[in-house]
Amino acid sequence: MKRRLAIFLLLTVPVCLSAQFVRHVSKVGTTAATFLEIGVGARAGGLGEAFVSVANDVTALYWNPAGMSELTHPQATFYHSPWLVDIRYDFAGTVIPLPSNGTVGLFYTGVTMDDEPVRTVFYPEGTGEYFQAGNVAFGLAYSRRLTDRFSFGVTVKEIQEQIWHMHSRSTAIDIGTLFRTRNRGWRLGMSISNFGDKLKLEGRDTQQKVDIDEQKAGNNDRIDAHLDTWAWQLPLLMRVGLSKDWRLGSTQHLTLAVDAVHPNDNREYVNLGVEYGWGDFLFLRLGQNNLFLPDRERGWTYGIGLRTHFHGKANLSLDYVAREMGVFQLVTGTSLTVMF
């Protein structure tokens, strides 16, 4: 009996310890193309990025493609954010409702930076050369109402990363659903983003000259070699959200939204946001980002929006967001949206 107990403990204790270890591993830094996790749009940013169930403007292209079916007229937007450490983040997209066959959308996302000097061990101040680095994603989306309360959407996108002579590319899809309850106006949204092939950097910078035996004199010390690089997963994101609108009299409204997010390169967290609208002109937003995430850098988000109406059908919206980013302080973003 004692022998069986000892064998049982030897088998189960390591499993329990490894499970405890895995539970505390966040997997941060285990994916490529992490720019895909940067939220799009100043309105969504002001809501703490709790937007998967709201998704009723052109930025649904990013948050939940099913939300494009909420649009009754074409929209186009441009979003710019001076991101961290002199990195620039830009997004442009357009959504066009079709007469009877759903809604289509196109988008472009770019992450750019200034040229940087090439530095080596022997030339730490620079060789005189400069290199470029950046990321790009662009794609096509389609959404359709399957019933009067349920919508489905899908996005297909191309993802590219580049640094000097090295590059990688992948194809991924986003899928989303949006359900509107019959009573009380609740909306339930779900999306899975960046499901696709792994990314692997390739290029001429992996070609090297090596000496396979530095201790042996007279051998060829310039053998052509190729450095093998690893393939890394895309940042897969699963979002589930709930939101509701309240009318406050004839000219005011309030929107409350909450998202639960499950990434494959971090622990789960919650986003929360609220929007107050006065008429169809002024919008004030407040949110919390990455709630319950240990050691989080993100915190409060603050947003404001203005909308003006032109003669005819055209409307113009200008939105602004400021995000608390810990040691990086405030990171801002601005959106300009045209509704035809």
Image (tube, rainbow, N blue to C red):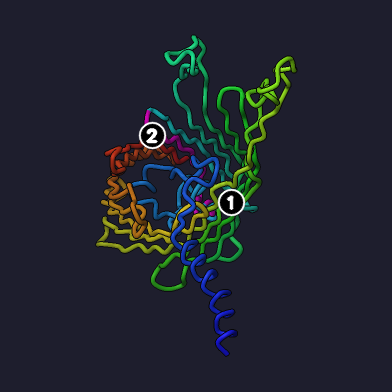
Residue 294 visible in the current orientation = yes
Please tell me which residue is depicted at 42% across the width and 64% down the height of the picture: 242
Q: Is residue 179 above or below residue 162?
A: below
Left or right, residue 325 beside residue 60: left
Report the residue marked by disc 1. Answer: 174
Disc 2 crowd, CA 10 A, few/some/many (<14, 14-19, 20+): some
Q: Is residue 80 above or below residue 72?
A: above
Q: Are marks 2 and 1 in contact (CB under 8 Å)?
A: no
Q: Is residue 330 above or below residue 242?
A: above
Which residue ends up furthest to the bottom in the rendered image? 1
Q: Measured from the top left, where is residue 219 in percent x and y? A: 74, 17
Disc 2 versus disc 1: distance between alpha carbons?
A: 24 Å
Report the residue marked by disc 2. Answer: 83
Q: Nearer the viewer, residue 302 or 315?
A: 302
Left or right, residue 213 beside residue 165: right
Q: Measured from the top left, where is residue 107 in percent x and y? A: 55, 38
Asked which secondary structure carries label 2, the reply is: loop
Q: Is residue 35 above or below residue 216?
A: below
Q: Which residues are magenta?
A: 68-85
Q: Nearer the viewer, residue 323 or 154?
A: 323
Image quarter in which the N terminus is found: bottom right
Please tell me which residue is depicted at 35% across the width and 56% down the height of the picture: 294
Is 33 a magenta residue? no
Q: Nearer the viewer, residue 134 or 140?
A: 134
Q: Amino acid at mark 2?
A: Trp
Q: Measured from the top left, where is residue 67 in percent x and y? A: 51, 54
* Quadrant housing residue 281: top left
Q: Identify the mark nearer the N-term, 2 or 1.
A: 2
Mark 2 vs mark 1: in front:
2
Please tell me which residue is depicted at 45% across the width and 55% down the height of the picture: 26
Please tell me which residue is depicted at 73% across the width and 22% down the height of the picture: 224
